[in-house]
Image (cartoon, rainbow, N blue to C red):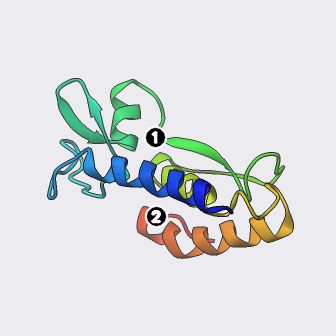
């Protein structure tokens, strides 16, 4: 990954983290991780709860190692958002869908999954 690409990723992350004040939480479930928060009208909610409010299931299909990986898993939308954000960090130096990319994703899923009720 070159310096320009890393700077873009970090700037995007910084903008996302600054969208919400410290201590703000989802109006429905009280989760407070700033990468998971979004707006639903005038209220702040997490990605899962926004989907629920729209009458959708709060889960999404995640491609382990990134697309075009055929290895997929249905996971909570909040966890999917975190794993997809992490993929941005290695996407430039690992081929999406490669065994190495899948391994990194599986390690992250193994460690972050239990926080969202997902176990391998």
* Crowd band around label 1 with a 10 angstrom C-alpha radius: few (<14), some (14–19), many (20+): some
Rendered-image quadrant of the N terminus: bottom right
* Crowd band around label 2 with a 10 angstrom C-alpha radius: few (<14), some (14–19), many (20+): few
Residue 51 position in % (x across, y down): 41, 33
Kindly identify the residue that appears in the image at 46 percent across and 58 percent down. 10
- Toward which corner of the image does residue 95 lie, by quadrant? bottom right
Q: Is residue 102 above or below residue 5?
A: below
Which numbered disc flags the more N-terminal residue, 2 or 1? 1
Residue 79 position in % (x across, y down): 49, 56
Q: Who is closer to the viewer here, 39 or 119?
A: 39
Kindly identify the residue that appears in the image at 20 percent across and 52 percent down. 30
Side of 72 relative to 35 (left or right)? right
Q: Who is closer to the viewer here, 66 or 70?
A: 66
Residue 4 position in % (x across, y down): 59, 55
Kindly identify the residue that appears in the image at 77 percent across and 46 percent down. 67
Q: Secondary structure at mark 1?
A: loop
Q: Is residue 117 above or below residue 28?
A: below
The residue where tag 2 is placed is: 117
Q: Looking at the rendered structure, which numbered label has been put on residue 39?
A: none
CA separation in Å, label 2 and label 1 = 13 Å
Kindly identify the residue that appears in the image at 35 percent across and 34 percent down. 50
Residue 16 position in % (x across, y down): 36, 47
Rendered-image quadrant of the C terminus: bottom right
The residue where tag 1 is placed is: 58
Q: Secondary structure at mark 2?
A: loop
């Amino acid at each position: 990954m070159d310096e320009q690409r890393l700077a873009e990723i970090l700037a995007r992350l910084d903008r996302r983290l600054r969208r919400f004040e410290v201590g703000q939480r989802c109006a429905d479930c009280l989760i407070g991780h700033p990468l998971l928060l979004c707006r639903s009208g005038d209220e702040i909610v997490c990605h899962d709860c926004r989907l629920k409010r729209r009458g959708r299931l709060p889960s999404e299909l995640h491609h382990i190692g990134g697309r075009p990986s055929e290895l997929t898993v249905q996971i909570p939308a909040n966890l999917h958002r975190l794993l997809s954000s992490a993929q941005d960090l290695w996407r430039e130096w690992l081929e999406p869908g490669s065994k190495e990319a899948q391994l990194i994703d599986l390690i992250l899923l193994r460690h972050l999954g239990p926080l969202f009720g997902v176990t391998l």
